Structures are given as structure tokens and as C-alpha cells.
Image: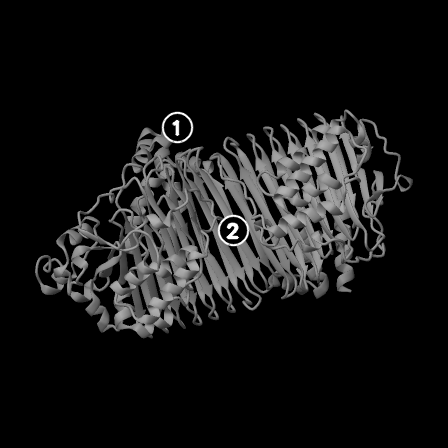
Amino acid sequence: MAALDETKVKEGVEKETVEAVRSIGERYKYGFESKVETEYAPKGLNEDIVRLISAKKNEPEWLLEWRLNAFRRWQGMEPPRWAMLEHPPIDFQEQYYYAQPKSMAKKPKSLDEVDPELLRTYEKLGIPLREQMILAGVEGAEAAPADARADARKVAVDAVFDSVSVGTTFKEELARAGVIFCSISEAVQEHPELVRKYLGSVVPATDNFYATLNSAVFSDGSFVYVPPGVRCPMELSTYFRINAENTGQFERTLIIADKGSYVSYLEGCTAPMRDTNQLHAAVVELVALDDAEIKYSTVQNWYPGDENGKGGIYNFVTKRADCRGARSKVMWTQVETGSAITWKYPSCILRGEGSQGEFYSIAIANNMQQADTGTKMIHLGRNTRSRIVSKGISAGRAQNTYRGLVSIHPKASGSRNYTQCDSLLIGDKCGAHTVPYIECKNSSSRVEHEATASKVDEDQLFYCRQRGMTEEEAVALVVNGFCREVLQALPMEFAMEAQSLVAISLEGSVG
Amino acid sequence: MLAPIRTRKTPQKLEAAEALLAARPAPEGEARWAREARAAAEARLREMGAPARRDEYWKYTDPAPLLQPAPDAAPAMADDEGPLWAGTDALRLVFVDGVFRPDLSDDPRMEGVEIAPLSEALAADIHWAADLFGRLEAEGQSQVERPLAALNTACAAQGFAIRATGKAARPIDLRYVHEDPRADAMVRNLVRLEPGAELTLLEEGAVAARANMCLEVSLAEGARLHHVRAQGRDHERVGAAHIFALLDAEASFKSFTLTANGRLTRNETVVRLAGDGASAHLAGACVGDGAFLHDDTVFITHDAVGCESRQVFKKVLREGARGVFQGKILVRPGAQKTDGYQLSQGLLLTENAEFDSKPELEIYADDVACSHGSTVGAVDETALFYLRSRGIPADAARNMLVLAFLDEAVAEIEDEALADVVRARVAAWLERRSR
């Protein structure tokens, strides 16, 4: 991490800490590339590519039309420039818009038929795609706990590799509960009525530049439908992996929680280390009907580029939840540690009376990373509530921006918002910025916004030191507290991963 | 450092800028340096274009009334309560509809203070104002475009150039009387305080049906300027007022603005803390009712070590009134030990009022303590209940709470006597309204 070498390290910072921080830049352990034979669509983007993607997926006519409409609109659009991000213009004709492992040309019937190299990739990433073994009573089955106890620990996974879904685990068990969990291409085939009803109903096909691009060329992603009154029996998870070079990943996720249902969904992402920038433009749509609750957690760890800003993923993501039903609830939790560029604003449209939106975020930008992330809480219904907790940490020469909107409409009487965004700066070459927009159009609502930017609090450090802690221990304690609110909002499965990611990055916030 | 915000130059913006310039030819008979400053401002405006609703910094405020060829009629309100600073011992300079009236003013002479009408200062071959006029405005354009300020530099013929070398014996009171319902005024004031100098500058009055006001302030080491402004009560007036302040080491700038009524008020304050240990305190209290839009747009740049800035803006809004706050603290690389504080609050008295706030931080130094808070809400019902349970009538209790809400901003006025004048005036307004 050359950036830190130039940075003046403050007195009292122990060498270990500095080393630890230095090593983060080199420690992207997911940077390997899998040798998988890949089939590409021709480079560039035109109507034929859109048709080709649609044909590959054997899509119905209406979906092709939908894609083409989006593509035509996209051609007349310009990339947004309002974010505090600097990058050379992206040449959209220099990308591949579709890449699939050759072995996936004919869809495998089960994971057993999947190319072992693919499975090894996920194994290396620590993603369990091993459901069959447990169910079939082969290797590892003895170690597997009894069904009843296992329920709490099981995580169903949909693994997306470049442009296709490799496989989805625990499908049958979920089906018994009535939960549909599959890749979106499968959903188009098997549940076209649901897809047609909800696709684009939260993020319209022409919402913004990147969402429109996604609508035209989206390749795969996850689809979840939880029927009325069902509490999804396990955590659902999607693991996104970019492998192929010069390939954009455009996944589309659609989650519908019907009346009175509950689902917790986890999302993880990694990519190989490469010198060139790669594009990732996803769209996530959540629909929560009456009394439904969706918990959506992300640990985003795309390759961030090297310490000089070479390579890394350009991450332009549109995530939006529609709390359509009364008393529905959506909770976004994100830990953003990767990507060269992050442009991401998971939002909630609080339409249903008494609906609730929450946003918890830790964004860490190191070296030359740039993050412009935040949320929008649009209060349309009466007595709607939202809460935003954002923790931004900047180090090296990184720029980290919180950008948010809280909008209380005239009819959203009795609504409530609380926002807290804190920034921590490590070193004198980075930047931390806050750009909140607060709009309140009725008097019975209350909006509170607080933001701070600072280094670690001296008084707290002094207090800890006075109690006999070493400087390092004190810093660890105080800094741990800085992120705790968000870490606690994560489900167990992710909290561990996130905590270790944050811990590495946070050592060295002494200053 | 990130690139400054530049707006999209639509043909409409550029044409509107031409129209603004065509409507007001630059004054004649000025010294070469002044002519050059005017020409440069004209070029800036042509390049920027006029403000438009689509510009990021005009998102919440429609600039159209400030751009139309002539202002809509805005009858002056009967002066039933007398000028705000009538009871304050000050050197008074009176403008009527934005034109200086020596016959109504005091003799502009005070020990240690040079006071000259703008036209005189700009006609002199050598004048201290050459280092100031248009310079701070131009610098203030570097991060965010402020076309109406460039227009003021290009065209304003009225105003004063004030320079203090010591501690001024009494405040200077600029009183802007509004008479003609169609008056369209443009006033430019320049203030330079030499090292260690101190001055209190008061401003009061509605100015005109439409006003474009601009104040450039340059404070040398250790200088202190207190600025207290009251923007009149005319219901229909529209106006844009800019303050550009540049502070050297240990200098202090305190500015408070009181606003009541007015269809459109846009107050932009741009401060650069350029010397170590400088401090700027900006505060504003406004009370709006009905067709009222009040916009405080603040940009503070911390460009030196150990500087302090503080913003406290309070708005009380009812019956369709809208309040806007856009405040930004920029901490440049190296501006360590910065202390930045910003508070913006809206109190909505009726269901149909609106408050929009955009409190921004942009920080490039690590040893800083910056914070902002922004809240919107109604009068606290429990506080109201408490007061009523103590036998205070509902209206009086409500006024008490509104006054307490505004007082946090009023208390930023350092001179207690001046703060009391403001307090009494606000209390009288609330009293009358609830009657």
C-alpha cells in the first residue's frame, strides 16, 4: 500500500497497525482466476446482442420486447455525472455482454453434472454448494446435524458465474415450504406470470442509465417468491463471481415477499485481480406486501484494484425496495469493502401505511478506491418510519461519499426518519464527504439528521488508557464501537465475514 | 480534489444571461481597473449562463422571478413598527429603492473609517477597493457558479466602500427603504478591515420589489466584523443577496440575518478561512407565512490550520411557506485542526409547510471535528402541554416555544443589545400574528 507510505502516520500508532493496514492492499485473497472454458457473445452492444441473450435464455416474446425497449431508451441516455467519482469514460462497445462457462451450454440437471472446476471455484471462495452430499448421505453426511437442528444453519445458495447461474441449492426443501428460489432465467420459464407481474415494477426499465442498460442485457440473477404467511425456513443467498475478462456482469434480482411472509437474503461478490476495469451493473428489486418483511444483506468484496488504482470493478448498482403493503418492512444492510468504484443507493419506497425502511451501511475505501453510496427513503404512506445508519471509513488516497435522500411527502403524515452518518478519516490524503438531501412536506412528521467526521475520539482513548489498556487495545475498542451498530444488523452468516473484513481495514484508524 | 460543479450550458441559460446584461449597461466614467473588473464579471456571467431550475444549486428554488425582465409589483409595507435599528446609535446611510440618498443620511465620516460611495471609489485611479471589487466574487465562483453575483459585479452602481483601520466608534447602519412598488435595485458594498480593526455593520429594510445585493468582505489579520442584517417585511419582494468573505489569520466574521416575509429570498454566503485560527459564525432566523420561500445557501472553505466555522439556521414556516437550506463545509487538504459545526432546523407550524435541507461535508484532512445536524418537525406537543398545565394560554405557549426555537440563532449575535432588539421584534411579530 504505497499510498500509506506517503501518508504521514500519526504519533502513537504502533508499527503492527501500520503493517496490518499496509497489507490490506495486497490481501485480496479472492483474486484468483478459474480456468474455465468460456463461451462469449460477440463483443459490443447492439440489438442483435440483446436478441442473442434473450434467445440463449429461450425467453418469451414480451421479455425480448421489454429488453429491446430498454436498449432503445438507453441509446439516448447519458451516464450520470453527479456522483463524486472520477473515472475515464467507459467504452460500452469494448465489453462482452454475455459469457458462460462452456460446460453450461447445456443446462446441467443437477450439481453433479456441473463442471468440477466451477465447483472448485466456489469451494475456494468458501461457498457451500454441497447440499446433495448431505441429502444423499455421502461424504460429510455424518457430520451434518439432524434436520431439525440444521434448519437454523442452512443457507440456500444461488451461484452466479459470469452471466449464468451455476446452480441453486436446497430448492426442494424450500419448495416444500412453498418458497420459490431459483435463477431468474429459470423463473422466466417456470413462473412467467410472477416475473411478468413484478419485473420492472420497482425499478422501471428506463429508471437510470445503468438500470436501463441492465434491463436490456441482464443475464442472470436470483428470483425469490415467498408465499403469504410463510417464514422462509433458511437464509437465502446468492454468490456472484466475475471470472471472464472484459466481461460485464449484469445480474437482476427480484424478491417478492407476499403478505405476512419473511425472508432473509444474503449477497456476496468477488472477482479476479486484473489490470483492466470491469463493469458490474446490477438491478435488485424487492417487493414487500402487507406485513411482509425482507432483510437484504450484502458483503461486497469485488476486486478493488491495486494500490495505484489499476484495475478493479466498476460497480454501478440500482437497488430498490417497494414497501407496497401496510406494515411491510425492508432492511438493507451492506458492507462495502471492494470495487474500484462504488455507485450504489439501496432505497425504500415506503408506500404502505406504517411501512418501515432501514439502511445500515459500512463503506470502507482504501488506496485509490472511490465510493459514492447511500440510500433514499421515500415516505409516501402515513406513519411510515425509516432509519439510516451509515459508517464511512476512508484510508489511503480514497474518496468516500455518503449520498442520501429522505423525502417525506405531503400525505405521509406522522412519519419519522432518523439518520446518522459518521465518517472516519485515516491519513491526510483521503477524503470523506456527506451529501444528504432532506425534504419534509408536512408538519406531523419528524426528520432528524446527524453527521460527524473525525478521527478516533481522544477522550475515549484517554479513558481507555487510564483504565490500563494499551493504545492499540483502546483504539481497537473504540473503533469496534464505531461500526458495531451496523455489524449487529447483519445475520450471523455474514457478521463473521464482515467483521474480519472490517477489522483488517480498521486497524490503523489511530491518528 | 474533486472538480467544481459546473452546470449544463443550455441555450436558454446563455440567452437569459445575455438578457440580464442587456437590461443593465455597466456604469460609465470609472477607472480602468474598475472597467476591467466589470468586463471580467460580464465574461464570467456569459460563460456560466443564468441560473436555472435544473442546476444542482437551484434544485429547491426557482430563480425565474430573479431573471424576468422587470419585477412583479411589490407594494411596500406600511412602516408601522419603525426601522429596526432606530434606537441604536449608528452612522446611518439611507437608500431609497436601492439609490443612496445623502439628504436622508448622516455625514459619512467616522474616525478610523473611510466611507465612500461605490461610484466614487470605482472612479478613483488608485483605491484600496481595486484589491477587493469583483475579486472575492470571482473566487467564490470557483466551486459553485453564482451567476447573479457576477451580474452584480458587472452592473451594480450603488453601494459603499468601507475601510476601517481601527476600532470603529459606532456601527454603520445601511438602511434600505422601499417605496416604489416596481423598484428593481442592485447594491454592492465592499468592506475591508485592516489588521486588528473592528466594525459592526448593520443592514435593514426590504430594499425594493426586487433586489440583487452583494457584499464583499476582506478581513486582515485579527480583524473582526460583526454583521447583523434584517431583510424587511414586504410580502411580495424577491431578492438574492450574496456575501463573499475572505478571512486572514485570527480574523473573525460574525453574520446574522433576520428574515420575515418576502416571496423569494435567496441568501448566499461564501466564506474562505484563509489564515490560521480564523473563525466564521453564520446564523439566520426566518419566519415565513403563505407564499414565502427562503433559501440559505452557504459555502465555507477551510483553507488553513485551526480554523473554526459555525452555522446555525432556523426557520419557522406556516401555511404553504417553504424553507431551504443548502450548507457546505469544505475542508481542503492540510486544513488540520478544523472545527466545523452546522445546524439547520425547520419548524413547521401547519401541515402544508415545507423544509428542504442539504447539509454537506467535503473533507480532505484527517485531524478534524466536523458535524452537522438537521431536523424538521412540528412544535413539541409535550412541551406545549407542560406550559399549558402551568396556566399559560395555548397561543402564548406556542409563541414561547417558537421564540425559544429561534433564539438559538439569535443568540449568535455577539452584541447583547442588538440581539435584544431582534428578539423584541420577533416577539412582536408572533404576538401580532396570534392575535
Residue A489 in percent (x, y) is at 36, 55
| Chain where mark 2 sits | A
Q: Do the residues labelled 1 and 2 touch (CB within 8 Å)?
A: no
Question: Residue at the left extreme?
Answer: A138
Could you confirm whether marks 1 and 2 are on the same chain? yes
The crowding category of the residue bearing disc 1, from other C-alpha atoms within 10 Å (few below 14, some 14 to 19, many at least 20), is: few
Q: Any mark on residue A409, and which?
A: none
Q: Earlier in the sequence, mark 1 or mark 2?
A: 1
Residue A318 in percent (x, y) is at 40, 57
Helix, strand or loop at mark 2: strand
Q: At 70% from the left edge and 65% from the top edge, which residue is drawn? A: B394
The one of A47 and B407 positioned closer to us in this rendering = A47
Helix, strand or loop at mark 1: helix
Residue B297 in percent (x, y) is at 63, 47
How was this image coloured? Answer: one colour
Residue that label 1 marks:
A6
Q: At 34% from the left edge and 37% from the top edge, which residue is drawn? A: A473
Residue that label 2 marks:
A436
The one of A203 and A409 positioned closer to us in this rendering = A203
Residue A332 in percent (x, y) is at 39, 58
- Is residue A359 in sight in this rendering? yes
The crowding category of the residue bearing disc 2, from other C-alpha atoms within 10 Å (few below 14, some 14 to 19, many at least 20), is: many
| Chain where mark 1 sits | A
Query: Does residue A215 lie above or below B208 as drawn?
Result: below
Residue type of the residue flagged with mark 2: Pro
**Quadrant where the C terminus of chain B is found in the figure:** bottom right
